[in-house]
Image: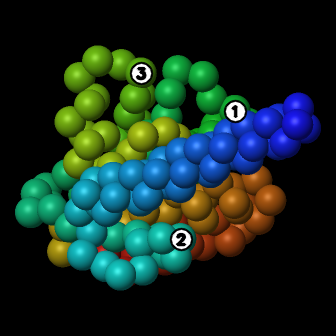
Amino acid sequence: MKNLALYSLLAIGISFASCQSNTKKETAKAETKVACTNDCSKCEKSAESKLTTQNVENAGIYYFHGDRKCKTCKAVGEKAKEIAEKMNAKFFDINLDEEGNEALAKEFQASGSSLFIKHSKSGEIENLTNFAFRTAINDTKAYVEKLESTLKADM
């Protein structure tokens, strides 16, 4: 009899835990859909997403980071700055931990270390974060070529 009561309580506990887990997942998915301003069906599958804004006078490379930067974060920022100078493009170094950068981070949907290119012709914002952090150290040549070709296409 004691075992039956113990197993019943255990089964009820597992049921509640699994319901809570599914509810949290569904809530997170719903919040993602509401927070996403992209009009694309491949947001979750796309490694490089694109946004558009009307303001094109501040075109260039936008590097977002916090106060503390790891080796990869430093490499992404340093190489992006070098390329911006080489290609005569603007480079914006934005510290997310400093006050006053919230609106810019919101415009770019940057919540952590990230890299974006804002195109001068279209005003489109291209998110190169995943590519940059994957290649800045391990395949620097590919990283540099991608930034250069993206900037050249906009000139």
Disc 3 is placed on an element classified as loop
44 or 78, which is in the foreground?
Answer: 44
What residue did someone put label 2 on? 47
Say what amino acid the circle numbered 1 marks.
Cys
Q: Would you call the spot at circle 3 few (<14 residues within 10 Å), some (14-19), or many (20 or more)?
A: some
Q: Give the CA distance from mark 2 to mark 1.
A: 21 Å
Precedes in sequence: disc 2 or disc 1: 2
- In the picture, residue 131 is in which quadrant? bottom right
Q: Is residue 144 visible?
A: no
**Residue 97's disc number:** 3
Disc 1 is placed on an element classified as loop
Residue at (42% x, 40% y) in the render = 111
Count of marks overlaid on the render: 3
Image quadrant in which the C terminus is located: bottom left
Q: Are marks 2 and 1 in contact (CB under 8 Å)?
A: no
Residue 107 appears left or right of 56:
right
Precedes in sequence: disc 1 or disc 3: 1
Q: Would you call the spot at circle 2 few (<14 residues within 10 Å), some (14-19), or many (20 or more)?
A: few
What residue did someone put label 1 on? 70
Q: Would you call the spot at circle 1 few (<14 residues within 10 Å), some (14-19), or many (20 or more)?
A: few
Residue at (26% x, 31% y) in the render = 102
Disc 2 is placed on an element classified as loop
Q: Residue 64 placed where, x, y %?
A: 44, 40
Residue 32 appears left or right of 71:
left
Residue at (58% x, 61% y) in the render = 130
Residue at (31% x, 40% y) in the render = 105
Image quadrant in which the N terminus is located: top right
Q: Give the CA distance from mark 3 to mark 2.
A: 25 Å
Say what amino acid the circle numbered 2 marks.
Ala
Q: Residue 34 placed where, x, y %?
A: 25, 57
Q: Residue 31 placed where, x, y %?
A: 33, 52
Say what amino acid the circle numbered 3 marks.
Asp
